[in-house]
Amino acid sequence: MEPILRNITPKDWVTIIIFVSVLFLVIAKTLFYGRFLNYLILPFNNKYIFMYNKKDKLQNWFHVFFTIFFIINTSLFIYLARNIFLDRSGMAYPFSYLLVLGALVLYILVKITLQLGNGFVFSTQRTITEIIFKKLSYLNYCGLIMLFANIFLTYVWEDSKAIIYISILLILLINIIGWVTLIRNHQKFITSYFFYFILYLCALEIAPVIIMGNYLKG
């Protein structure tokens, strides 16, 4: 029997990544179905925050699964967006995706560590943990948007900048809702540490967005 050479298309590894991310989503839904349903309406109703803010918090497996889901899809979204804005040649090289994935994981770990460290220094661990939980809840929700964006950018409209712009707009909208809710619920705490709050915004929230924008521009 004569061997047949099979050409593996560049999309194969992207398909695997999307499948793995969906697998974490399915696990979260299966193991925490009620929590999952409450989480789906997070941007429209903060019932999820009130129900789960006082227990489990960051250590809950539902939160962990969704964080992993978010990281995988965010890294892929950034990778695909950069290829669209620059060129498609990097599509066949998953190593570039791994670099984005590693950088995002490192950023999130450093960010959470610094936040928890500030909580320890100022003896506000409980409040800081609540703030981190709320911010990550809204941020992780954006993984759902990026999942659909990744699917469209990979299989439907491969060069669509409109999909990227719409996705970024929705992501910003969800995070703005999260920040408004956060500031409203922690006005006194933020006022007490206003200088550190502004410093935090500039260093850990605004600066990464600028860096990502420069990365997409090449």
Image: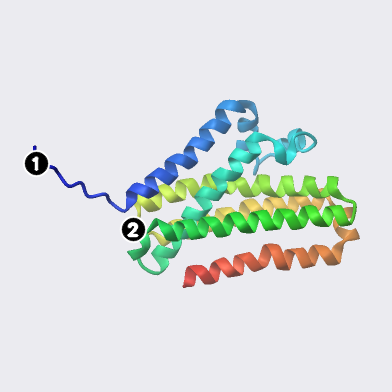
Query: Colour scheme in the image?
Result: rainbow
The residue located at (45%, 57%) in the rendering is 97
Element under label 2?
Answer: helix
Q: Residues within 10 Å of mark 2 (few under 14, many from 20)?
A: some
Residue 150 horizontal/vertical position (percent): 44, 50
The residue located at (75%, 33%) in the rendering is 51
Q: Is residue 162 visible?
A: no
125 displayed left or right of 68:
right
Residue placed under numbered mark 2 in the picture: 92
Mark 2 vs mark 1: in front: 1
Residue 71 horizontal/vertical position (percent): 56, 50
| Quadrant occupied by the N terminus | top left
Q: Can residue 65 be seen in this view?
A: yes
Residue 103 horizontal/vertical position (percent): 56, 60
Element under label 1?
Answer: loop
Q: What amino acid is labelled 2 in the image?
A: Ala
Relative vertical location of residue 216 with respect to residue 69 in this rendering, above or below: below
216 displayed left or right of 16:
right
Q: What amino acid is labelled 1 in the image?
A: Glu
The extreme left residue here reads 1
Relative vertical location of residue 54 with respect to residue 188 in this rendering, above or below: above
The residue located at (65%, 68%) in the rendering is 207
Relative vertical location of residue 70 with respect to residue 207 in this rendering, above or below: above
The residue located at (78%, 34%) in the rendering is 55
Q: Residues within 10 Å of mark 1 (few under 14, many from 20)?
A: few
Residue placed under numbered mark 1 in the picture: 2
Cα distance between the residues tagged 2 and 1? 28 Å
Q: Give the mark nearest the N terminus, 2 or 1.
A: 1
> Which one is in front, 60 or 6?
6
